Image (tube, helix red, strand yellow):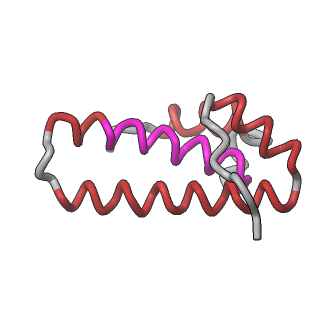
Amino acid sequence: MYLSKEKKAEIFAKHGKGATDTGSAEGQVALFTTRIAHLTGHLKKNRKDFSTQLALQKLVGKRRALLSYLYKKDIERYRAIIKALELRDIIKTIK
């Protein structure tokens, strides 16, 4: 796999509560963002790789769901992770 244990631990340490806290929403969003960037680069080279395209769409959906959860539960944590990962504000309105 392209992500080693050390790289994952670094991502969770930077964005989560600690290197071993793999379940926090912020850590998961950061990991998903890293994976999305990797898959996007792969798809730029391999346009007809439809299984990777499907995996990317599912991953984006998971990240969006986690960000929606953060938006509803704690808006400050949501704003902090959006700013740290340099994502645009995905959640426009919550119904």
- Percent across and percent down for residue 57 are 38, 59
- Quadrant containing the C terminus in the rendered view: bottom right
Q: Residue at x 68, y 52 (%)?
A: 91
Horizontal arrangement in the rendering, residue 29 relative to residue 71 (left or right):
left
Q: How many marks?
A: 0
Q: Residue at x 62, y 28 (%)?
A: 86
Depth check: 16 or 87 in front? 87
- Quadrant containing the N terminus in the rendered view: top left
- Percent across and percent down for residue 19 are 69, 39
Q: Residue at x 73, y 41 (%)?
A: 16
Q: Residue at x 88, y 53 (%)?
A: 74
Residue 12 forms part of the magenta stretch: no
- Percent across and percent down for residue 92 are 70, 52
Horizontal arrangement in the rendering, residue 71 relative to residue 11 (left or right):
right
Above or below: residue 33 compared with residue 70: above
Q: Which residues are magenta?
A: 23-40
Q: Residue furthest bottom?
A: 95
Depth check: 35 or 63 in front? 63
Most prominent secondary structure in the magenta stretch? helix
Depth check: 93 or 28 in front? 93
- Percent across and percent down for residue 82 are 69, 37
Dividing the picture into quarters, in which one does residue 11 lie? top right
Horizontal arrangement in the rendering, residue 42 relative to residue 38 (left or right):
left
Above or below: residue 36 compared with residue 23: above
Residue 35 forms part of the magenta stretch: yes
